[in-house]
Image (tube, rainbow, N blue to C red):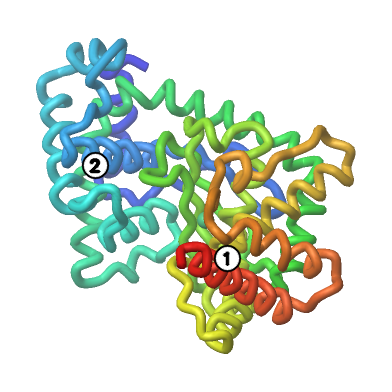
């Protein structure tokens, strides 16, 4: 889209408008997938600001995008650059990281908080965020959005038939093994370029529900891994505070007096969601699938993988309760720890 056409479109929108309620690209029983202009602009600003803070390459620094950026008006360029400065100072001061400012802007964009509920400092951030995005929109709309929207939609199109085939089986099984029902469905999934810094992130909502950001360009989240990772993200909802899996794990850690360094529930989510997806695909006769944990070599060389591979399949096979499996897991981790301490002696 040429910049001036985009600007004309933009001027038809009130500058302080809350996020667009545009129709999703895909609706399924558990998810609505969006390729939303404002959310993608926000993602690009966060990425550019984090890059600016560490003096790394930004958007519009190279290739045809640099050419495009050089050809738009000085005002549109200055708008973009000053807004990146604001994001670098206020929204992502310690890149890569997540600040309250960033969370507030994201929730405003997802439209999951009624506008009148933004108060005090959050109200200021929301109003500034909307105004700043308006100032950055002409450059982004001219030099990145058309390509980004295409990439997001292609990612969703690739996932759609896989979800159509396997969503019900996987979602149903996840609710069983996590021991808690889905609520607040469908979850809104915003497909963006980077979802800095991990490529995917979920916020659990109140009233119950979840908002997912996921990258359409991160090569780790393509093909069948996209299917697993949307469910891994959604399983953050099933492992929220007070839910059976985190409670069982916290209890086992406490009773066996083990201070695990990290979020053990998150590791269990990587293993269990991956395994549920792998088994569902196998049962449906799909080609053999390697879960994300293994494909990415997560937990390689540590004690987690051997411990969970011993402790968790009996739970998935119905031979152990969740509480027993959590104790088995922590015990196996402790044994591995003692084993490696003995080796060092
Ligand atoms: Zn996660």
Where is residue 68? Give x, y as percent.
Answer: 26, 13
The quadrant in which the N terminus is found is top left
Task: Residue 209: tell me if it is visible.
Answer: no
| Residue 329 figure quarter | bottom right
The mark closer to the camera, 1 or 2, is: 2
Q: Which residue is drawn at 48% across and 47% down?
A: 200
Where is residue 3? Give x, y as percent.
Answer: 28, 19
Measure how far apart labels 1 and 2 are at the Cα level.
Answer: 27 Å
Q: Residue at x 28, y 63 (%)?
A: 100
| Residue 325 figure quarter | bottom right
Residue with the most extreme front position: 345
Q: Which residue is at the front of the view, 117 or 230? A: 230
Task: Residue 185: tell me if it is visible.
Answer: yes
Left or right: 242 in relation to 316: left
> Which residue lies under the disc numbered 1?
237
What SS does tag 2 mark?
helix
For label 2, being within 8 Å of ligand 1 is answered no
Q: Which residue is drawn at 46% across and 52% down?
A: 201
Q: Which mark is residue 199?
A: none
> Which residue lies under the disc numbered 2?
50
């Amino acid at each position: 889209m040429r910049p001036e056409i985009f600007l004309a479109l933009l001027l038809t929108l009130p500058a302080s408008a809350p996020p667009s309620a545009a129709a999703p690209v895909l609706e399924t029983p558990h998810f609505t997938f969006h390729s939303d202009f404002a959310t993608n602009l926000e993602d690009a600003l966060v990425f550019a600001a984090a890059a600016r803070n560490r003096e790394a390459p930004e958007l519009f620094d190279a290739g045809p995008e640099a050419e495009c950026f050089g050809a738009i008006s000085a005002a549109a360029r200055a708008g973009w650059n000053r807004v990146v400065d604001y994001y670098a100072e206020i929204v992502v001061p310690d890149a890569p990281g997540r600040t309250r400012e960033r969370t507030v802007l994201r929730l405003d964009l997802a439209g999951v908080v009624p506008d009148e509920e933004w108060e005090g400092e959050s109200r200021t951030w929301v109003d500034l965020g909307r105004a700043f995005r308006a100032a950055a929109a002409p450059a982004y709309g001219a030099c990145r959005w058309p390509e980004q929207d295409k990439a997001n939609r292609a990612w969703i199109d690739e996932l759609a038939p896989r979800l159509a085939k396997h969503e019900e089986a996987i979602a149903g099984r996840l609710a069983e093994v996590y021991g808690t029902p889905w609520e607040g469905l469908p979850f809104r999934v915003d497909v963006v370029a980077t979802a800095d810094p991990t490529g995917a992130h979920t916020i659990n909502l109140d009233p119950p529900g979840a908002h997912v950001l996921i990258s359409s360009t991160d090569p780790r989240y393509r093909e069948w891994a996209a299917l697993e990772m949307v469910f891994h993200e959604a399983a953050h909802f099933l492992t929220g505070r007070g839910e059976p899996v985190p409670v069982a794990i916290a209890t086992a850690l406490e009773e066996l007096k083990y201070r695990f360094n990290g979020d053990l529930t998150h590791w269990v989510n990587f293993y269990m969601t991956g395994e549920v997806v792998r088994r569902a695909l196998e049962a449906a006769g799909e080609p053999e699938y390697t879960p994300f944990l293994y494909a990415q070599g997560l937990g390689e060389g540590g004690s987690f993988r051997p411990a969970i591979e011993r402790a968790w399949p009996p739970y998935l096979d119905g031979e152990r309760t969740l509480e027993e499996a959590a104790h088995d897991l922590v015990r196996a981790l402790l044994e591995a720890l003692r084993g490696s301490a003995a080796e060092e002696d």
